[in-house]
């Protein structure tokens, strides 16, 4: 979440008049995240999230995102729901951007998650994968191998501004992953961005998942590897094997990973670390001054990438290589 596009109170009230949501009492921008413009609204009925979809989000993808949230909620997963307008449509327009109102999910994201929280995240991710079965709209992962190459080409010539030698190192990583990327693993709908700020807790109990705007169809174990990167490293860059073990055990308590998925996990984790390094690198180099957005340090994911490059087997993540 972020704020790239500003809105006026007059325009916002006109937009809200198309919904049965009560009268606007206050609104404020949400600075976290990097993808869309988001505001927290308070009305005389309920708090809501207003999302304006920025240029990096294709309008043609919005039926997938909004429909997926409805599909998952219908199957018992706690997540925000898009609100229909008075004409039944889920999507409107505000300040020249496609826009939607989303229900507010109670809870807070954790700044310092513990192993018990990682276990809940793993189980919730598996439940999402199962709940996603039968969703008939497809969306390829635009940020897989081909997307990484394209993204790298936009930053490659400036990479050494971040760290000397980075241009050659990342080019080598892309060559390696292109040659070794797994194929034919179990696939389905994945969240693809289940970071700490996209998981809400009430106390120690997970209350729901949010922000499905990177969701797509890809390998389910790839989604697991994203969570390993997002949840199981400490501030100093060290991998926390206790958290990793808990997350993987939590996932497998709901959906056991197959032998082929377990064997592929180190490569998948290496790839997901590269994916987030590349998007952070691009944003670090190109985000305009003055945008109300928190830029994220790409070096964090460079360290994770280097860790995974040294992993010999899934046992290094804290679990047996045998299926559960």
Image: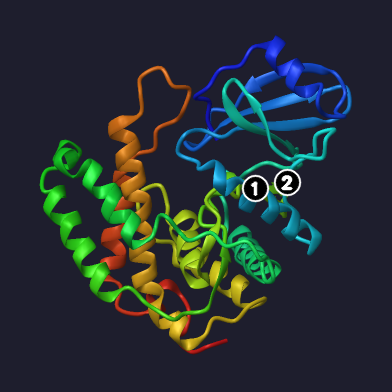
Picture quadrant of residue 290: top left
On the image, the x and y values in percent for residue 15 come to 73, 22
**Residue 72 drawn above or below residue 99:** below
Residue drawn at x 53%, y 34% is: 36
- Circle 2 residues within 10 Å: few <14, some 14–19, many ≥20: many
Residue 234 or residue 288, whichever sits in front = 288
**Residue 2 drawn above or below residue 192:** above
237 lies left or right of 122: left
Name the residue carrying label 1: 210
148 lies left or right of 256: left
On the image, the x and y values in percent for residue 147 come to 34, 55
For the residues bearing labels 2 and 1, Cβ distance under 8 angstroms: yes
Residue drawn at x 56%, y 57% is: 191
22 lies left or right of 179: right
Residue 61 visible from this viewpoint: yes
Residue drawn at x 35%, y 23% is: 288
Total marks in image: 2
In space, the residues marked 2 and 1 are separated at their CA atoms by 6 Å
182 lies left or right of 83: left
Decide which of tag 2 and tag 1 comes sooner along the chain: 2
What is the secondary structure assignment of the residue under circle 1?
loop
């Amino acid at each position: 979440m972020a704020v790239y596009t500003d809105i006026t109170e007059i325009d916002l009230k006109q937009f809200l008049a198309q919904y049965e949501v009560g009268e606007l009492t206050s609104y404020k921008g949400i600075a976290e995240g990097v993808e869309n413009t988001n505001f927290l609204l308070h009305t005389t009925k309920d708090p809501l999230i207003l999302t304006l979809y920025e240029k990096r989000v294709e309008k043609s993808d919005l039926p997938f995102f909004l429909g997926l949230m409805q599909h998952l909620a219908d199957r018992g997963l706690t997540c925000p729901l898009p609100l229909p307008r008075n004409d039944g449509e889920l999507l409107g327009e505000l300040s020249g951007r496609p826009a939607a109102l989303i229900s507010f999910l109670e809870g807070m994201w954790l700044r310092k998650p513990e192993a018990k929280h990682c276990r809940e995240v793993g189980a919730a991710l598996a439940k999402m994968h199962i709940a996603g079965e039968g969703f008939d709209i497809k969306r390829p992962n635009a940020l897989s191998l081909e997307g990484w190459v394209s993204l790298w080409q936009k930053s490659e010539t400036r990479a050494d501004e971040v760290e000397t030698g980075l241009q050659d190192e990342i080019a080598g990583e892309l060559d390696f992953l292109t040659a070794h990327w797994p194929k034919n693993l179990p696939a389905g709908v994945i969240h693809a961005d289940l970071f700490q700020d996209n998981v809400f807790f009430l106390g120690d109990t997970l209350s729901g998942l949010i922000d499905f705007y990177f969701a797509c169809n890809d390998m389910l174990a790839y989604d697991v590897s994203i969570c390993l990167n997002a949840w199981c490293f400490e501030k100093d860059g060290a991998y926390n094997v206790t958290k990793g073990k808990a997350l993987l055990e939590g996932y497998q308590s709901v959906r056991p990973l197959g032998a082929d998925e377990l064997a592929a996990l180190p490569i998948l984790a290496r790839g997901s670390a590269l994916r987030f390094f590349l998007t952070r690198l691009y944003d670090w180099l190109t985000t305009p001054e003055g945008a109300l957005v928190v830029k994220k340090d790409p070096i964090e994911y460079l360290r994770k990438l280097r860790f995974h490059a040294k992993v010999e087997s899934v046992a290094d993540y804290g679990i047996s290589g045998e299926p559960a």
